[in-house]
Amino acid sequence: MLTDGLVQQGHQVSNPSLFAPCPQLPVINISEAQKQTMLHLNYSDTIHNTLDLSRYPFAAECQTPPYIAFIGRMAPETGPQFAIAIALHAGLPLKMAGKIHPSEQEFFDHQIKPHIDGQRIQYLGDVNHAQKADLLAKAAVTVFPIIWDKPFGLVMLESMACGTPVIGMNCGVIPEVIADGKSGFICSTINEFVKKISAALQLNRADCRHHVETLFHPTLMVSQYEQAIGLVLSSQNNLHTFQRHQS
């Protein structure tokens, strides 16, 4: 499991100053969405993140009665407030999990906490891996109503690996991860989320797992990195590519 410190450092790759000393350094981005945030970089390939599928047991059926799952930081841009609205309008219980950063405590206290009743809306706190996998596997559908250009979202892969379809907002990496109409749905409004809940319940959960196994398998990612690195090293301009910029 990544520590908070490592995750924070990983997020710093979006800082343009990090690449300033070596402007020609080849960069492998984790999504086309990430590339759009820093078009000036020397991108060599796009290789999506993946996960250890053995840690996410497949569930052929969801729990009865069904519920909606949401996992993410309790922050405005991740959309827990929208997940609540979706669940209430769809008439299904919502189970949420995720951290509350000190800077986002006020948002949680005012926008999220008043809706938590332990029945229709449940907040499970910052769950561990086993609890997260169980929450996702038993869910009827996972909602991912983010409102920022997220470069990737492992929760979507984790959910689909368990067999649970994902309904996500049409922004950031979401269209690259969800197979619309097969492993979930891509929406542009909260009303669309609500309308797609019933359709998501009819999707084949095995197709969700297969989608991850086919396009986001660890062996595929390793092969892609080997090929990308090989191309860079075999380039006739590789010495120039790695030359440090002289200011």
Image (tube, rainbow, N blue to C red):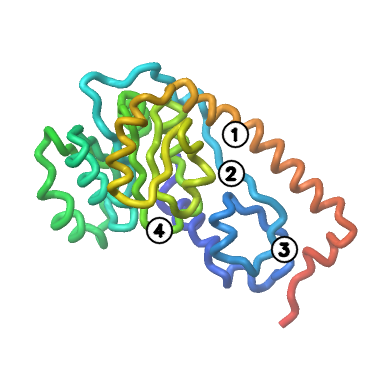
Say which of marks 1 and 2 sits in front. Answer: 1
Tag 3: residue type? Leu
**Circle 1 residue:** 215
Do the CB atoms of the residues marked 4 and 1 lie less than 8 Å apart? no
The label number, if any, that marks residue 25 in the structure image:
3
**Circle 2 residue:** 48
Q: Spatial distance from mark 3 to mark 2, Cα to Cα?
A: 19 Å
Q: Give above or below for 204 relative to 243.
A: above
Q: Spatial distance from mark 1 to mark 3, Cα to Cα?
A: 27 Å
Q: Spatial distance from mark 2 to mark 4, Cα to Cα?
A: 18 Å
Name which of mark 1 and mark 3 comes first in the sequence: 3
Q: Give above or below for 191 relative to 15.
A: above
Do the CB atoms of the residues marked 3 and 2 lie less than 8 Å apart? no
Say which of marks 1 and 3 sits in front. Answer: 1
Q: Nearer the viewer, residue 156 or 242?
A: 156
**Which residue does the image show at 55% across and 57% down from the upper left?**
34
Q: Where in the figure is residue 66, as x and y percent of width and height?
A: 24, 25
**Circle 4 residue:** 148
Do the CB atoms of the residues marked 1 and 3 lie less than 8 Å apart? no
Q: How crowded is mark 2: few (under 14 residues within 10 Å), some or many (20 or more)?
A: many
Tag 1: residue type? Leu
Name which of mark 4 and mark 1 comes first in the sequence: 4
Q: Where in the figure is residue 187, as x and y percent of width and height?
A: 39, 46
The N terminus, quarter of image:
top left
Q: Nearer the viewer, residue 115 or 241?
A: 115
Report the side of 141 relative to 49 (left or right). Answer: left
Do the CB atoms of the residues marked 1 and 2 lie less than 8 Å apart? yes
Label 2 residue SS: loop
Tag 2: residue type? His
Q: Spatial distance from mark 4 to mark 3, Cα to Cα?
A: 27 Å
Q: Residues within 10 Å of mark 4 (few under 14, many from 20)?
A: some
**Which residue does the image show at 53% across and 63% down from the upper left?**
14
